[in-house]
Image (cartoon, grey):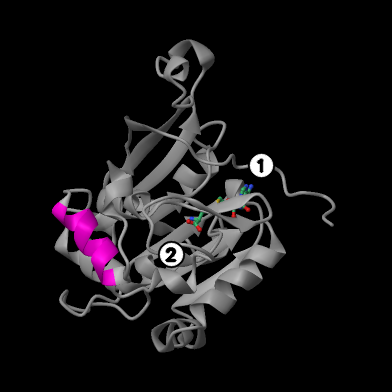
């Protein structure tokens, strides 16, 4: 169904996702309207599909970016601290930054920021280049609201935590306890996780054995994990030791 949401402009794409019910939250819609995918997707920017961005990475489909934001929305407020693991193109990092600087929510804290982390230096550079294509993006980088760093996202990024929201954009082998540790209480982690083969009821239909898990750390520090839907992400891996 998602393919039919593709548009010829950014606004048309986002409005199609909205009309199809794939984005339901007004704030998410506004945040996505505020980022031109043309700055992040090298070809067919307004297609509702994942696309290669080089180095074995893909920019996820816009409806997946929308879902990720909607699952995290209650933890994306002015002042929120956010970690985007496997930031790749930088698109979602930009949308997340829009959500924590949303002028319709009362601003309580100037401390909010988004860290995008990727283990491929060239993709970190690409994300910065992409974000620099718009004035808003340049302001985010200049003010330090958004920072792209190079590192192994499985270890999180302790320096700027704890985080209200952590998004993982590549499939993990498990729910890494380090990431749960770096959540604020309350805070939420959105993470695709490879399932054990025996759990994988969908693999025979070619859907892959990965599921999004939503992990909530409650205000009292207790942790609740929920498996929400089947997905197909590139894996969260060791950094390539040598590239051409
Ligand atoms: N959210 C991004 C998704 C990019 S694809 C987007 O829509 O553009 C997944 C990304 O995860 C790739 O950029 C890949 O380099 C990165 N990645 C894979 N393993 C990683 C790891 N261990 N640490 C950090 N980044 C990782």
**Front-most of 204 and 126?**
204
Quadrant showing the C terminus = bottom right
Quadrant showing the N terminus = top left
The answer to whether residue 123 is above or below residue 20 is: below
| Magenta stretch bounds | 11-19
User: Is the magenta region chiefly helix, strand or loop?
Assistant: helix
In the picture, measured across the screen, residue 221 lies left or right of residue 41, that is left
Q: Residue at x 33, y 47 (%)?
A: 3
Q: Position of residue 168 (x, y in %)?
A: 47, 48
Q: Position of residue 59 (x, y in %)?
A: 50, 56
In the picture of the structure, the residue carrying the numbered disc 1 is: 237
The answer to whether residue 170 is above or below residue 131 is: above
Question: Between marks 1 and 2, how big is the CA–CA gap?
Answer: 26 Å
In the picture of the structure, the residue carrying the numbered disc 2 is: 45
**Front-most of 146 and 229?**
229
The answer to whether residue 205 is above or below residue 188 is: above
């Amino acid at each position: 169904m998602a393919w039919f949401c593709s548009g010829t402009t950014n606004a048309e794409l986002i409005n199609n996702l909205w009309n199809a019910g794939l984005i339901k939250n007004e704030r998410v819609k506004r945040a996505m309207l505020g980022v031109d995918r043309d700055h992040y997707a090298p070809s067919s920017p307004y297609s509702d599909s994942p696309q290669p961005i080089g180095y074995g990475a893909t920019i996820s489909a816009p409806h997946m970016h929308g879902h990720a934001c909607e699952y995290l929305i209650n933890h994306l407020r002015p002042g929120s601290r956010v970690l985007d693991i496997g930031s790749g193109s930088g698109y979602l990092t930009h949308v997340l930054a829009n959500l924590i600087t949303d002028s319709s929510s009362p601003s309580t804290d100037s401390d909010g920021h988004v860290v995008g982390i990727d283990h491929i230096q060239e993709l970190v550079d690409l994300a910065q280049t992409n974000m620099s294509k718009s004035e808003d993006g340049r302001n985010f980088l200049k003010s330090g609201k958004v920072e792209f760093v190079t590192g192994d996202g499985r270890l999180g990024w302790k320096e700027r935590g704890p985080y209200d929201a952590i998004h993982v954009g590549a499939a993990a082998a498990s729910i890494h306890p380090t990431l749960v540790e770096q959540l604020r209480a309350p805070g939420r982690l959105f993470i695709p996780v490879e399932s054990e083969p025996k759990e994988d009821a969908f693999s025979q239909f070619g859907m892959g054995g990965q599921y999004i898990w939503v992990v909530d750390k409650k205000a009292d520090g207790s942790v609740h994990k929920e498996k929400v839907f089947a997905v197909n992400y590139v894996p969260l891996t060791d950094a390539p030791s040598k590239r051409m």
